């Protein structure tokens, strides 16, 4: 949705929603953070998503995830698991996003925020500076699938997803700011047929922007249904 109009004093209502899809992979190449062993999960085991710092190749200046007015858990806790994460300057904390192994989840509203002038200004500045949101699931960083311009079928990924983007409404030349406030997660895993346990091999996200209006919930349901069909 729109983070704010051209006036920094504008107030907007911010919705965050999510969709989870779990896919089984017979085999897959992936990577884990160094010094951390992969874990085995049984069906229904909780999969808490952690958030890391906001990063930008444009400024090289990291910000805490909760510097922006994102959905917050009841208590924000430091969730770094090893010395390497601390030495790298990671700011790993808990989040409101939690999944369950091998259980798909429908779209749901994670939170509702009303942006004041300062919050809207912060989002706009981070969009201008091309900041990306970084998340972690079982020590795997979230990635966005990137389509190659040369038409190659080779799969490539980008770490994290953009805070938002600038664009125009159809028929308008006025540039506005939009926040990626709808996240469609896809967790791919490898299942051991002998133990029935699974290991996560890929953590993907497809960020989108949804505008909160009286049609919000209807559009949300339709989009989630279409995304589920595509996967």
Image (spheres, helix red, strand yellow):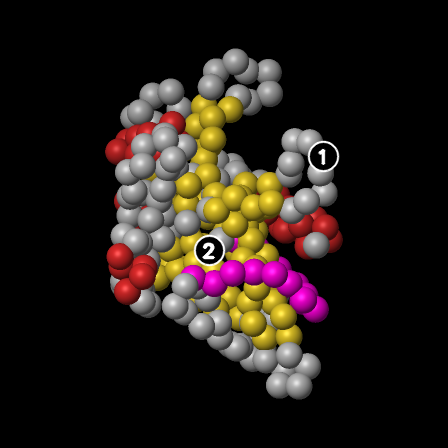
Residue 48 relative to residue 107: left or right: left
Q: Which residues are magenta?
A: 18-33
Name the image quarter holding residue 43: bottom right
Residue positioned 33% across, 49% down in the render: 53
Q: Looking at the image, tell me whether mark 2 or mark 1 is earlier in sequence order.
A: 2
Residue positioned 60% across, 20% down in the render: 170
Mark 1 residue element: loop
Q: Nearer the viewer, mark 2 or mark 1?
A: 1
Q: Is residue 70 visible?
A: yes
**Callout 2–callout 1 Cβ contact below 8 Å:** no
Q: Which residue is mark 2?
A: 141
Residue 151, label in figure: 1
Sort mark 1 into few (<14), some (14-19) or many (20+) by Cα contacts within 10 Å. Answer: few
Residue 24 lies, in percent from the top left, at 67, 67
* Residue in the foreground of this view, choosing between 196 and 185: 196
Residue positioned 54% across, 58% down in the render: 203
Residue 27 lies, in percent from the top left, at 67, 66
User: Is-magenta flag for residue 32?
Assistant: yes
């Amino acid at each position: 949705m729109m983070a704010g109009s051209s006036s920094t004093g504008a107030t907007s209502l911010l919705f965050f929603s999510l969709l989870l899809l779990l896919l089984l992979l017979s085999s897959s190449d992936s990577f884990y953070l160094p010094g951390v062993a992969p874990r085995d999960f049984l069906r229904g085991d909780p999969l808490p998503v952690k958030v890391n710092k906001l990063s930008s190749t444009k400024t090289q200046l990291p910000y805490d995830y909760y510097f922006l007015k994102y959905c917050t858990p009841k208590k924000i806790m430091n969730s770094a698991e090893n010395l390497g994460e601390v030495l790298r300057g990671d700011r790993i904390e808990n989040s409101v996003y939690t999944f369950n192994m091998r259980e798909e989840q429908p779209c749901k509203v994670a939170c509702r925020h009303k942006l004041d002038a300062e919050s809207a200004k912060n989002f706009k500045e981070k969009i201008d500076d091309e900041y990306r949101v970084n998340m972690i699931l079982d020590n795997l960083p979230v990635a966005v699938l990137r389509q190659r311009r040369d038409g190659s079928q080779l799969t490539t990924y980008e770490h994290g997803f953009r805070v938002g983007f600038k664009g125009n409404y159809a028929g308008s030349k006025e540039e506005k700011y939009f926040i990626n406030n709808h996240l469609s997660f896809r967790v791919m895993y490898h299942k051991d047929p002998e133990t029935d346990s699974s290991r996560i091999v890929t953590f993907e996200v497809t960020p989108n922007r949804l505008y909160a209006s009286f049609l919000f919930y209807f559009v949300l349901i339709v989009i989630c249904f279409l995304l589920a069909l595509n996967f």
